[in-house]
Image: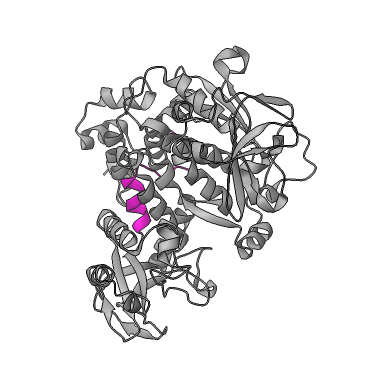
Amino acid sequence: MVGALGSFVGAAMQLQRLMRIVSRPNFEMFSLLSGLGRQLPRWPEVRASDGTMWRQFSTKEWWLAVPSRSVDVGRQVVHPGRECSDRCARRSRFGSKTERLAWLIHHHVVHSGCATIQLSDREVADCLWGAGGCRPDHWRGEILQRLQTLQTVAAGLTKDGSLPKSENLLLEEALDCRAVPEDDRCWDRCPMRGTGAHHHYIVGVTPAFLGSLELCRRPGVESESARYNFHDKRILRRLGKANEITRVFLPAVLGESRENVGLTSPIRQMILGLFRELTRAPRREQAEPGEPLRIEGAVVPDFSGKPAFCPLLDPNARYVVFGGNGYRSGRGYKVNSPSGWRLKLCGIDASVEQTLSQLRVLAEMLSLRIVGASKSGQWLTLGELNCFASRRLQGQLDQVHVRVYAPDRCWIEWARQFGWSFSETPGMPLFQRVGLECRRREWQQRELARRMGIAPSTLSRYLSGERRMPAEIANAALSLLSEPTGLGAENLRQ
């Protein structure tokens, strides 16, 4: 019993390390960066009080704006270097890589609790093009261009009614330290510290970049850069009750595997939306905060919420459920309701057929069980739900609650699939993660190399940073190091 409880606690802690809090409007804003370059020419122009022109996209909750020419905002001059035309929009550095860069910056800021951070050029390159991936010519210059692109973007709440100001820009500064050699030194938190030659970027974020999380700012701290306490449970609980923050599954936005880097934006958004609906266990049953609800014996709530046996689930397996929280915890949503799966996973513009099609792709990728609980007491598969949608039987779909089930501790396998390890340091390169796990578990490099089938000298060059460690080899090493019965020093003596 104690061992089982310990494994549950460990799984809950691993899940917490794979999640990161983010403001809901900023979550949508980062997602929009993927297609911003194509949408920019269609945005209407607005004129600020100082006469400058901006292209602005607005929703009910927030707006996003890009200047149409050089704009003097506050104490800095924004030079987008383009006009808002089709030709110049193609020259801008938006897209999925800029979205990943925004998530990397957000991850570092939340982890360090500081508004000014230092990024390593090799770390950013691994994030944008994958560990061991093919980098373009002048890739450092492209990273700087993407950082400068984020400097031109402004965001804020529509209820404020004001147009872009210095505090509305996402980034306050983006400095390439190659131009200032005295600043090109590793800070204490640099993950590439002591791993060979590399360069840095210094990035400073504004309150608009953090959104509602700006309330976590530490008062009265004398420093050149703002400091934050993102572990203040009182503030986070208040923001959570107001539905102003959400959680994001980090491996889906920052994993280094080629499969993750190449994920299409709709699939990535579905994964992130799915994790926001992970059903939590009742608070009195949680060994750790945020511990998910586990289903055993294939007994789940039916349409009305009463416990019932589901024949579509394996009674000998344990599942976690992505079915929402609150008073209807774990019972899922309708596909086509105003706040159902269509809106939560694909957006309001998607059709029911598109939502179910994307769910099928996601189920095949992540080994999910899609189950529909009908009002008549039937249990429906994803194929049967597709039949209802293809035959335009919307009335029957409106009488079905759809839930998503996954094997217990599925996030661990998904994290490895997306090229993520459980290192506490954000952005730590794969070879450093392998070396860290070796030291933690007292593994010897020679034995690890033998188990992996490579020469000890080759592994030594990988771990020292002399040679780039391919993602496939690093993930194989991390998989061996995660085995419950390792080859530690105590085992090697036997």
Please provide percent x and percent y for residue 18. 45, 50
Q: Quadrant of the C terminus?
A: top left
Q: Find the magenta span and give its range.
A: 410-428
Left/right placement of residue 252 relative to residue 71 reads left
The residue lying toward the viewer, choosing from 19 and 373, is 373
The residue lying toward the viewer, choosing from 87 and 420, is 87
Residue 351 versus residue 218 in the image, above or below: below
The residue lying toward the viewer, choosing from 235 and 92, is 92
Q: Residue at x 48, y 35 (%)?
A: 101
The residue lying toward the viewer, choosing from 152 and 170, is 152
Q: Residue at x 77, y 45 (%)?
A: 219
Please provide percent x and percent y for residue 331. 42, 75
Does the magenta portion include 123?
no
- Residue 394, by quadrant, is bottom left
Q: Quadrant of the N terminus?
A: bottom left
- Asked whether residue 204 appears in the rendered view, the answer is yes
Please provide percent x and percent y for residue 78. 64, 26
Q: Residue at x 42, y 21 (%)?
A: 139
